[in-house]
Amino acid sequence: MQLIQEAFNQENVLLDLPADDLNNVFASVLSFLSEQGKLRPEDQATIRTALLQREQEVSTAIGHAVAVPHAYMEQIAEPAIVFVRLSRPINLGAPDGIPTRFVFVLLGPKGHSAEHLDSLTTIARLMSDDEFRYAARKSASHADLASALDDFVRRTTPQPEAPPAPDTPEELQFSGRFGGGIIADVKRRLRCYKQDFVDGMNPKTLSATIFLFFACLAPAVTFGGIMGDATGGQIGAVEMLVASAVCGVIYALIGGQPLIILGGIGPLLVFTQILYDLCGAEHFLSAYLWVGLWTAGFLIVMAFTEASCLMRFFTRFTDDIFAALMSLIFIIQAVHAIYLIFERDFADPTKHDIPLLSLILALGTFQVAIMLSQFRRSRYLSSSLRLFLSDFGPTISMASMAIVAILARDYVQLDTLDAPDTVRPTFPAAESGLPPRDWLIDPFAAPMWMRFAAILPAGLAAVLVYLSQNITVRLVNSPENKLHKGAAYHYDLLVVGLMIAGCSLFGLPWLVAATVRSLAHVRALADTEDKVLSSGDTQEQIIHVCETRVSGLLIHILIGLSLLALPLLQLTPKAVLYGLFLYMGVVSIRGNQFFERLCLLLMDKDLYPQTHYIRRTPVNVIHKFTLIQLAALVTLWFINLMPKVGICFPLLIALLVPLRFLLNRFFSEEDLAVLDAREQPAEESNDWAV
């Protein structure tokens, strides 16, 4: 470790060296050392020949995009290490099959084999660390590398005197003080506030902004249109767009976890529809206002009393079911929308082209986005271009399919986005006989009994918002996402509660953390690599996420600006947006262990991937655990579809927690510890990373 520290501190570093083979690398390194006076110029040719001969005998590429060529000769007076980062990787036949980007050249006099083995071991440990490898890729100077090395040493040095880490995350530890959780959240996130904007100066921010703008705009218009139908036109697409823009900008500026995307969700839509059916058109907005105010009050009390600490009783069992439900809503919504187009037009032979082109555009958007997002692992084009295509894959897919639709519009009349014409409160349905409403709802128009009767439905709404918000925050801050700035459960619940109060006063939809959009935001800002497991299977893992407020701020500013260009939104083909929905739903499934285990039910037992839970748990136990989750998911799905019973949906989500504790009576503690572990065991990190 000392030699590597000296190499970084003494500027024995060559960054982004334009070399096509090791011969050029060695020539540059030896010339560099000669200029520093560490080698005699006449010895360069001899040492380079020795390095090349050593490489011809067996490649020194050890995996993780790293090679460690070395030479120990009499011509070398003292040990030296030179770190080289190549501008373009070269294929040296590494055991993981990944081209080499980083080269540690080890030189020294004869008889220093012990130091060589120590350095080789240190380099292997160093470059197998995801965070250091990311820092090595992004460092702009030797000082950045030295800082990353110091951070690695600090993170990996054992501290036997330190108390063991608690099982409960810091953010969910009960302080015992009124508002103590909110204060701790603010302190934790406030020290990162400036860096949240600095980190946004990243190309990924632009790609994430463009992708998520459409990914947030489409559900806003779609959910707004559905809500307009469900509420007799009293809350519609305009209100949803205004709420998304205003609340999104506010949350991006003052929210605790800026990677969260607020939006309308299916369960809240069902709740609003039930409320409208109970109250009728005449009293709906007054009841909606008071239910919203009581809901906000409950959430604010929950935030100050640290009710979010109860989330420590939630486990991966509940997280995976909830995430699967939110993903399925997006996937099935996209499939159902395409089905409705076929049902409407396919019976008419003169309109066969509409459903067929819609299907092509939807699947084309999905497939192109998937292919481009995986293009970074391709062997074609330069690494920078591969990364660009991967980051902007969803945007490119939407743009390309939209161009196809535009070129065909003279021949095929496709469905386009149902955007409103002007920015004004949605007109109530004609049959309601109600006049157009103002933006501000009069709270005193409701009779006194209604103001207090609103407490009961508000309690159910508060439970739904509490669970949706906090489960999404848990999923976003999962250890697998490698976030470092911390969560803000209590403070964010307070912010959401205040926003619901404001939205209720103006007759706007209630917004909460949207699971699929939030996870898509995280992945859009993430650097990933493929981990090659010992079984030979590959598994994508996140190595770093750009934790910034800039993308969220820009996304919702663009949604606000879209209100000034509503006629242009009406030109967007719906089929392209359905393809985007499908992409978001499928991508958000990645990493959901429940879906991985579900696939085992259809897989040849002899070809199971060698994951940690398969190695440690009997197969019949895995299947039994998975089927219980599947039964819970199916139950939630059907309850969500039943209008009269849907109001109980939040209570059923909460019941997943006692259901999980009930499993202790049917599964051993050891099996549950493996199947319900929030983090992947450390032993998995021994596999190769691509």
Image (cartoon, rainbow, N blue to C red):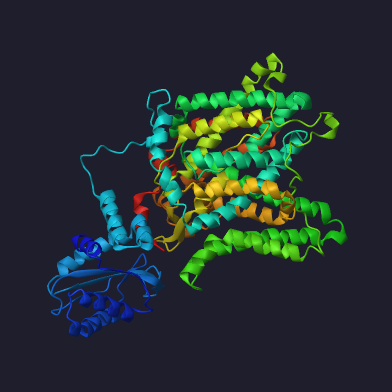
Quadrant position of the N terminus in the picture: bottom left
Residue 358 falls in image quadrant? bottom right
Give the residue displayed 25% in from the left and 53% down from the top: 153
Give the residue displayed 30% in from the left and 60% down from the top: 145
Residue 160 falls in image quadrant? top left
**In this view, 643 is above or below 120:** above
Does the image show residue 423?
yes
Does the image show residue 513?
no
Q: Position of residue 64 (x, y in %)?
A: 36, 64
Q: Position of residue 617 (x, y in %)?
A: 42, 47
Q: How many marks?
A: 0
**In this view, 614 is above or below 630:** below
Q: Position of residue 634 (x, y in %)?
A: 62, 40
Q: 78 or 609: nearer the eye?
A: 78
**In the drawing, does residue 501 fall left or right of residue 238?**
left
Q: 4 or 163: nearer the eye?
A: 4
**In this view, 188 is above or below 554:** above
**In the drawing, does residue 426 fall left or right of residue 203?**
right
The residue furthest top is 448
**In the drawing, does residue 333 fall left or right of residue 324?**
right
**In the drawing, does residue 60 fall left or right of residue 478?**
left
Q: 504 or 397: nearer the eye?
A: 504
Quadrant position of the C terminus in the picture: bottom left
Give the residue displayed 81% in from the left and 59% down from the top: 413
Q: Position of residue 534 (x, y in %)?
A: 39, 61
**In this view, 347 is above or below 172:** below
